[in-house]
Image: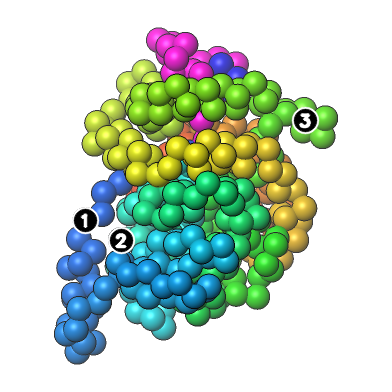
Amino acid sequence: MPFEENPAPGATRRSLIVGAAVAGAAATVIGVPDAEAAERRNSGDTAPHKSEGKRTMTSGKTEDGFVTAKDGASIYYKDWGPRDAQTVMFHHGWPLSADDWDAQMLFFLNHGYRVVAHDRRGHGRSTQTATGNEMNTYADDVLAVVAGLGLKNVFHVGHSTGGGEVARYLGRHGTSRAGKAALLGAVPPIMVKTAANPGGLPLEVFDGFRAALAANRAQFFRDIPSGPFYGFNRDGAKVSQGVIDNWWRQGMMGGTKAHYDCIKAFSETDFTEDLKKIGIPVLVMHGDDDQIVPIADSAMLSSKLLPKGSLKVYKGFPHGMATTHAETINADLLAFFKA
């Protein structure tokens, strides 16, 4: 397997190949309507608050849970919590959706934050785009959400591909609307092996992803979460079928073309110069048993490129640690935000 010299005993060849996939985590949206209702009761507002549904066709404008990108694509978002509270915006990994962040959204909502998460174009409930499935457009879509909602001093949290999206957004559009950022199991600086990145993964690995996705996306999206993504291929792992099924559910909501294109985006985009430009505090969080995005060629390098970067390594944590170890990750993010 390309990600580790000593794979766990009993790991299958299939699970090891699948282990190269770059993805997000999984959870189920539970209890948010009650939380929002309680907030409305406390504030004296008894009118229903819609957080999703209608579409608007004016670039950067918002209505009920969609903003329209420059090319007309509809970008879905969730926006919960007090409008005047500190905002945390979450950026999911490939090939998932904003639902990836359920455990974090509920946690920070209950701690008084305003929480926002969007479905990347081609993913989840957003338009299944045939074009624009690359990092510059992803970053522009983030700006459409941020500007459309009038967000300022945002704390951005990105996992895996979403970490690359955060880096490109801040590098491309600046930090005037941002306060802090956190990169979890994130793909920067660059995943693929190049002359400048000899520790990266061979291009053939990602060609294999594209072939597997094209041949049988539904099965590929079963193999990833049931194996290395959450460390479920490790001896003694406590496997959750619900987590596996929810990962698959989110992945299959998106478009095949967008998912196919995104493999190139997350593997071949070089975020080195973006990282160097980010002048706000950035916490780099990574599990040392991440079988998807190897820590040596990602977090260990990114943390050194960031002007105000700090690194926190989690012993034994997998790529999907925001789900498997949500209590620890949430507490550390909260401490970072309050610092």
Element at badge 3?
loop
Q: Position of residue 234 (x, y in %)?
A: 39, 21
User: Which label's residue is closer to the chain start, 3 or 2?
Assistant: 2
Tag of residue 106:
2
Dividing the picture into quarters, in which one does residue 224 lie? top left
Which of labels 3 and 2 is toward the front? 3
Element at badge 1?
loop
Amino acid type at image mark 2: Leu
Seen from the viewer's position, the closer of residues 151 and 331 is 151
Tag of residue 220:
none
Q: Is residue 299 above or below residue 63?
A: above
The residue to which callout 3 is attached is 194
Dividing the picture into quarters, in which one does residue 202 lie? top right
Q: CA distance from mark 3 to mark 2?
A: 40 Å
Q: Is residue 278 above or below residue 62?
A: above
Q: Residue furthest right?
A: 195
The residue to which callout 1 is attached is 30
Count neighbours of disc 1 (C-alpha within 10 A) and say few if under 14, some if 14 to 19, many if 20 or more: few
From where the camera sits, is residue 19 visible?
no
Q: Is residue 35 left or right of residue 334?
A: left
- What span is colored magenta in the figure? 4-22
User: Which label's residue is closer to the chain start, 3 or 1?
Assistant: 1
